[in-house]
Structure formats: C-alpha cells, structure tokens
Image (cartoon, helix red, strand yellow):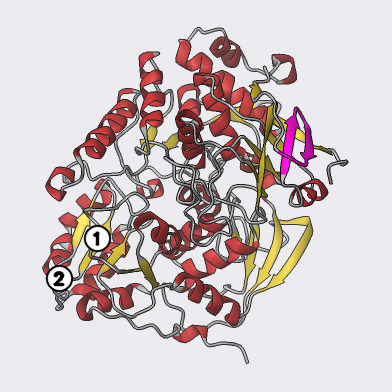
Amino acid sequence: MTEMTLHGKALIAGQASGEVLHADTGLSFMGGVDAATGRVIDVHHPLCGQSVAGKILALPSGRGSCSGSLVIFELLLNGHAPAALVFRHKETILTLGVLIAAELFQRGIPVLQLDEAGFAALSKARFVRIEGDRVQPTETLAAGPHTFVLPKPDPADFTLADIDRRFLAGEFGEAARIAARIVLQTARIEGATELVDVDMAHLDGVFYQGPAGLQFARKLCDMGAKVRVPTTMNAICVDRRQWRAQGVAKGLGEASDALADAYVEMGAKPTYTCAPYLLDPAPKAGQMIAWGESNAVVFANSVLGARTLKYPDYLDILVALTGRAPAADCYLDASRRATIRLDLPPLTDLDDLFFPLLGYHVGKIATNEIPLICGLEGQKVSHDDLKAFGAAFATTSAAAMFHILGITPEASTAGAVLADEVRGVTVTLQDLAETWEELNIARTPDVDMVSLGNPHFSLTEIAALARLCDGKRKADGVRLIVTCGRDVHAQAKAEGLIDRIKAFGGEVLNDTCWCFIAAPVVPQSVRNIATNSGKYAHYGPPAVGKDFHFASLERCVDAAVTSRIDTTLPAWCHRDA
C-alpha cells in the first residue's frame, strides 16, 4: 500500500518515521505500559509483551485510567516514548500528556487522528512516514527528521473572558500563564470555543511513577503555582504514616512524600483518596468540577449528576490553577446522551460481585460511547454498587459516564438520555459468565492474599467487611488488606469497625490504593490474590505479577479464613440455555 497516502487531523503536528504497531483494542498506558521501558504489560491486551518505544503506535483510543497522560509524559522524558501516536477516535488523555511535555520540557511527538477507513488501512502497513496531517506507508524504515510543532491557539478562535486574557498576560504569574495556554490548547483539541468556571478539582497524578512527574510538580512550585479552587488529592504510592515500618524502599517512599508535598505546597488538600465523592462536601447535581481519576469521573457524572471532563493527569492541576476549563464533552447537555443501549436478561439474587462484573463487561462493549443499561429497574442498587460498577466500567471504557435506567439521576426514562441515533446490544448471562472467567486467571483455588479497596472502601463497605469478619479469624499465611481514605478511616475507627477487622487479622492502609501497591506489601511468596474489585482484577496481574481470583466480598473473606476460594460461578450467573 505504498502508493496510498492517508490524510488525518494533526492534533500535534510534526514529522516522524517508524515501524507501525497497530491494535484494534484501546490501551490504558497506566497499568498497561511500563513507564520506565515502554513495554506493554496489560495481560488482557493483544500487544502485551511488545514495546511502544520508537514505534508509530496506532490505537483506536486510550481507555481506562486518567493517568495515561502521566505515563506518556514519563516516556517522553526518559526516551522510551513512541515516535508518534495515531488514533481512530478523539483521544484527550494521551494527547495532553504529549502537549504538556512539549510545552514545559520541549519533548514532543506527532499525534494524529484518522478516519475509520484510514485507521483500518494503517493496519496493513509495516513502516510509515508522518508529515503534518499525512501518513505515507513505506517499504522500509524511512530516514528523516523527527519533529513536533505546538500550534499556538489564536485568542480570536475563542470567546475569552476578561479573566482568561489576564491569565494569558501573566497577571497571575508564570505558572498560571502557562496553565491557561495549555487549557486553551485542550479546548482546541476538544473542539471547544470557550471556557467555563469550575468550583473544585481533584488531582489524580500525584503519585510517583518516575522522576519526570516530580520534575513537573517542582517546576510548577518554583513558578509560584497556587490553586484557585478547593482541590483534593488522589491516592499515592505509599501509606505516608506506615511505609517505613512496612519496609517500602526508601527511594520510593521519599520520592512519593516529596511529590505529595509539592502538591500540598500548591494548595491542594492532602486527602489521598481515589474516592473523592466520599469526602464532604460531595459535588451536587449540575455542579461544574474538574476531577481526575477515572472511577471518580464516572461516579461524579453518572451517579451525582455533577459535570466534569475525564481529566488527564497534569491537566487537572492546570485547571485548578486557573479555575477555568474547556466547555466541552460532559460539561454540555448534548454530550451526556447515550449512544448505545444495553438490555440485560432477567436477574435474581444478585450479590455485590454482579456490579463490577457488569461494569467491566459493559465497558468492553461501549469502549468510546456513553451507555444506557436497561433491566435493573426495580432492583435495590446502592451507591456502593454503582461505585463498583463505575470503577470497572472506567477500566475498559474511555467514556466519562454511564446511565442506568431508573437508577442514575438523569435516566428517569430512556428518552431522557438517549441520543437520536442509538445502537442496541443484548447482554446474556453467558456473556457475563465469560467475562467472569476472563478475570479469574488463577489456576488453583488457593489464596495467599485478599486485596480490598480499589476504589477506596466507603464506611458502609467497611461495615459490611466487619460483619463478615466477626467471630472469625484469618488463616495463618493469608493476609487480608483493605485500603480506605483517611476521612473514612477516622469514621470507621470511631465506630469500632477498624478494631473488628483487626481482630479478624485484617490490615487497613490509608493514602495508597491497589493500583500502586507492590512488594514488600505484596510479598514475593504470594501466588494467588482474591479481590472483589473488577478494576484490580484487571490491573493487578501486570502490576504485581500474581494470579487473581475475582469474587464477592463474602467469598473473599471466606477465602482468608480457609486459604481457598469457591471457584464456582455466582448463583445468579447460570448460563443461558
């Protein structure tokens, strides 16, 4: 296909040559690509084991974590990034990581978006040369420069408020000026023509993944950066009060502390939780906010009815510095409509495993679409159920929200949320059984560790765990660890719940969560981990190199007692005839 030149949209223009690495499945760089080497580590992805370094990486989009921008940022600064990124769909998270590295550190690569036919044609090419918005397949690896060009957004293209012009003029300092520039670049990528005010922010990229992230935060601090809206912080890599006693490596612990302190220096509140919706005050319906952390984004949009983009790491702090955000995506009524309807089979006797399993499955179908799930009307569905659903959905989908008919606030009727053009999908019990098998990769029923709290447990989840632990004692050689935020921990401690879990032999960690926890908290001797989190069942295997059981909370606690887990399908998930 060397005679065919493909034309696309240059999100970040430039020149690059390289071997094509193409996949038809979206990839989360966070938990899916090693930030130090560029190797794909997502065991569920077709590119697993291959390196993105120096390649023309072609993906439909990213997916899952908001922290993909953080990982591509690290790769750009350590020299293991792709030579270029080519997407089928609009992809903000990875594009913003490139944009911020280019703006602040002059490290960038071309980023393009192709139409469906062009993206499919690219799968047949071995090598390509990129020039601006053109992709030219070549027989061999072509020589040539590798460059990038940052477009300068013309204020004439935007409806700028007076406060925006003052930011751009440097009236509020250099950090705010650069933040405003990047926010405007984001607006261009998103197709927005104006900015909106936000009332609060939640920062996802406050955890240490390498020296580039600390460089970024310190550079902002050195420029005098201060947040302009109330701002909370996500979980980090360590429990700040326990990491030394746990034997965590000094280098990781001190770097994590330094990074967290930098964001506190900018005015962020040290909440250290991946479940900011559990903090007081939670956002209200219709409130404009700027949240990172994928599970928090979908919970805010879907369950609380608040409005936020799915903020890439590092863009969240830049919006917090200005209080201004692109008027795009889920800030707009039209962009909150569902374009896919999923109909569920008749369901009875549901347990808590159903919701993360369903969320993970729905995300695999609605990879870039907002779904409406039908068939749960009349079921008792709690906020904890929706929290588990949303975290798993946000693992496999790039969408920023979901609707559940008769359950989530905007979906009182199907007509209230469906777009004009909608496709329909029927979900069967066999479909769900196959997804359950996909996440249960452990080959034996043995359990060495039970990992709970991804996302951080709520007070009601801790109470449920305490009830299951009462009167029992975990087996020797098995660890049960639950993570939660400091605020929830204080409430649970006051109610005696923490002591009941510890009497069982369980452990409770704050500040960190399972996306970041590794040795020595997860010892090398551990072979099989049990979890009730669809998110951790996906990200855990490449993160810690262990096999996983995905099960209900009750089965997880029983496994901690007996060292073995019930590996039969949940009772509600009997296969269709």
Q: Which residue is mark 2?
A: 504
| Residue 524: mark | 1
Residue at the bottom extreme of this rendering: 577
Evaluate whether residue 12 shows in this view.
Answer: no
The crowding category of the residue bearing disc 1, from other C-alpha atoms within 10 Å (few below 14, some 14 to 19, many at least 20), is: few
| Magenta part of the chain | 127-140
Whichever of labels 2 and 1 marks the residue nearer the N terminus, that label is 2
Q: Amino acid at mark 1?
A: Gln
Vertical relation: 176 (above or below) 127: above
Image coordinates for residue 413, horizontal then vertical, percent: 67, 63
Image-quadrant location for residue 46 = bottom right
Give percent across and percent down for residue 165. Answer: 60, 12
Position of 144 with respect to 65 (left or right) is right
Q: Is residue 244 left or right of residue 189?
A: left
Q: As rendered, which of 54 and 496 lies closer to the eye? A: 54
Q: Say left or right for 24 vs 314.
A: right
Q: Nearer the viewer, mark 2 or mark 1?
A: 1
Q: Is residue 137 magenta?
A: yes
Helix, strand or loop status at disc 2? helix
Q: Quadrant of the C terminus?
A: bottom right
- Residue at image coords 58%, 81%: 429
Secondary structure of the residue carrying tag 1 is loop
Residue furthest to the right:
3
| Snapshot quadrant of residue 162 | top right
Secondary structure mostly seen in the magenta stretch: strand
Q: Amino acid at mark 2?
A: Phe
Q: Which of the 4 image quarters holds residue 534?
A: bottom left
The residue positioned 28% from the left and 55% from the top of the image is 483
